[in-house]
Amino acid sequence: MISIVQQTLDFYLSKMSVPDITEITLANEELASTKWSCFVTLFLKWEVRWSAGNIKDVLGSIAEELIANTIQAISKDSRFSPLTIWEKNDIKLRVDFIKNRKVVSRTPEQAKDWIETLARIDPIKNWVIVIKKDYSKTATILPNIDPKVVSGNDYQDILSAKLEEQFEEDKYIIYEIETIVERDY
């Protein structure tokens, strides 16, 4: 499925348009008919430079999700400038396919202390998405991606930096995500 991301990059950078699913070579027809949500991440010099995805499948197929998320990442991720043709040969790709997602449950007592909730999530295997309850902010931490996150206790500072405000658990919906990862490195 990394092949779909690579083909999308090649098509977009050469024609400056989004490929249709019929313009991509699929390894098998299930990719055009099976729904599965995913997240596409591109690295430049081993740092995350572009990323986009959905925790729920929103399009008709895996292939369509991969195409849309690749284009979203390389051209619309507001944290970074768009991918250039000169950078393409130096990037590494990672695709996370959502295997399981759940809202992290917490008792009222646990909600008083973020450590009680986030500390239970293993940052090596699972990732975290937080969405502000008024939907004004969101932050994602993929598994095994940030060297500063070695245990669930490390989420607080990273989330606060990504959200550009102090992360307060009671103001956010917290998702724990399990994925199947495919990469080209």
Image (cartoon, grey):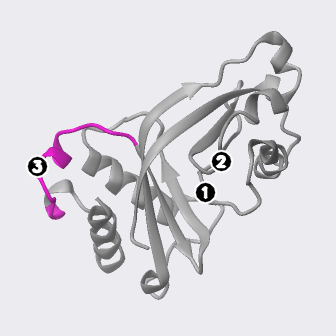
Give the answer, above or below, for where 108 lies relative to 76: above
Residue 93 within the magenta-colored segment of the rendering: no
Categorize mark 3 by other alpha carbons within 10 Å: few (<14), some (14-19), many (20+).
few
Q: Using residue 61 as the reference point, say whether residue 160 is left or right of it.
A: right
The three-letter code of the residue at mark 2 reads Pro
Q: Which residue is the site of mark 3?
A: 29
Q: Quadrant of residue 7?
A: bottom left
Residue sitting farthest toward the left: 29
Q: Which residue is the site of mark 1?
A: 144
Categorize mark 2 by other alpha carbons within 10 Å: few (<14), some (14-19), many (20+).
many
Q: Which residues lie in the magenta part?
A: 23-37
Q: Position of residue 55 (x, y in %)?
A: 48, 37
Report the magenta stretch's main SS. loop
Which residue lies at the image location 71% right of the left edge and 25% below the top edge? Answer: 134
Tell me the CA gap for discs 2 and 1.
6 Å
Observer-nearest of 157 and 135: 157
Name the mark on residue 123: 2
Asked if disc 2 and disc 1 are in contact, CB closer than 8 Å, the reply is yes
Q: Secondary structure at mark 1?
A: loop
The three-letter code of the residue at mark 3 reads Glu
Q: Secondary structure at mark 3?
A: helix
Residue 34 within the magenta-colored segment of the rendering: yes
Q: Using residue 29 as the reference point, say whether residue 12 is left or right of it.
A: right
Which residue lies at the image location 15% right of the left edge and 64% below the top edge? Answer: 25
Q: Secondary structure at mark 2?
A: loop
Q: Position of residue 5 (x, y in %)?
A: 33, 64
Observer-nearest of 128 and 139: 128
Q: Position of residue 52 (x, y in %)?
A: 50, 53
